[in-house]
Amino acid sequence: MSFDPQHLQDIIACPKTKAKLICEGEFLISVDPETRLKYPIKDGIPVMLVDEAVEVPQTEWAEVMQRHQRNPETGELVS
């Protein structure tokens, strides 16, 4: 059985900053605008190791935040 990150987005958090994560394809991306970390999902299982995370460029991160109805500067939910 594989992990469904959509169901646990509100439970799991970035291990470095404790910020919420959003699922984007085969990655979980932190909503923290300072770190913008992206964690891979391998074989259906998220790899929640800071050493395995990659920093997302600001413009790409902003686009992801907009797709998920979040402020592209702060990562906060847009009302």
Image (cartoon, rainbow, N blue to C red):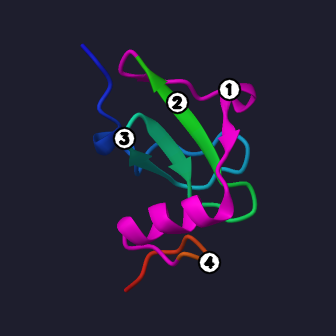
Expressed as whole percent of the image width and height from the top left, the position of residue 16 reads: 73, 43
Q: Secondary structure at mark 2?
A: strand
Q: Which residue is mark 1?
A: 52
**Residue 25 circle label:** 3
| Image point (62%, 77%), residue name | 73
Question: Which tag, 2 or 4, sits closer to the chain's start?
Answer: 2
Q: Which residue is mark 2?
A: 40
Q: Which residue is mark 4?
A: 73
Q: Are marks 3 and 1 in contact (CB under 8 Å)?
A: no
What kind of residue is marked 4?
Glu
Q: Quadrant of the C terminus?
A: bottom left
What kind of residue is marked 2?
Pro
Q: CA distance from mark 2 to mark 1?
A: 8 Å
Q: Is residue 63 above or below residue 42?
A: below
Q: CA distance from mark 2 to mark 4?
A: 23 Å
Q: Is residue 13 above or below residue 3?
A: below
Expressed as whole percent of the image width and height from the top left, the position of residue 71 reads: 51, 78
Please give left or right for residue 25 compared with residue 65 in the image.
left
Q: CA distance from mark 4 to mark 3?
A: 21 Å
**Residues in magenta, as a range:** 43-71
> Residue 66: within the magenta?
yes
Q: Are marks 2 and 1 in contact (CB under 8 Å)?
A: yes
Question: Which tag, 2 or 1, sits closer to the chain's start?
Answer: 2
| Image point (40%, 46%), residue name | 23
Q: Secondary structure at mark 4?
A: loop
What kind of residue is marked 1?
Glu
Question: Which tag, 3 or 2, sits closer to the chain's start?
Answer: 3
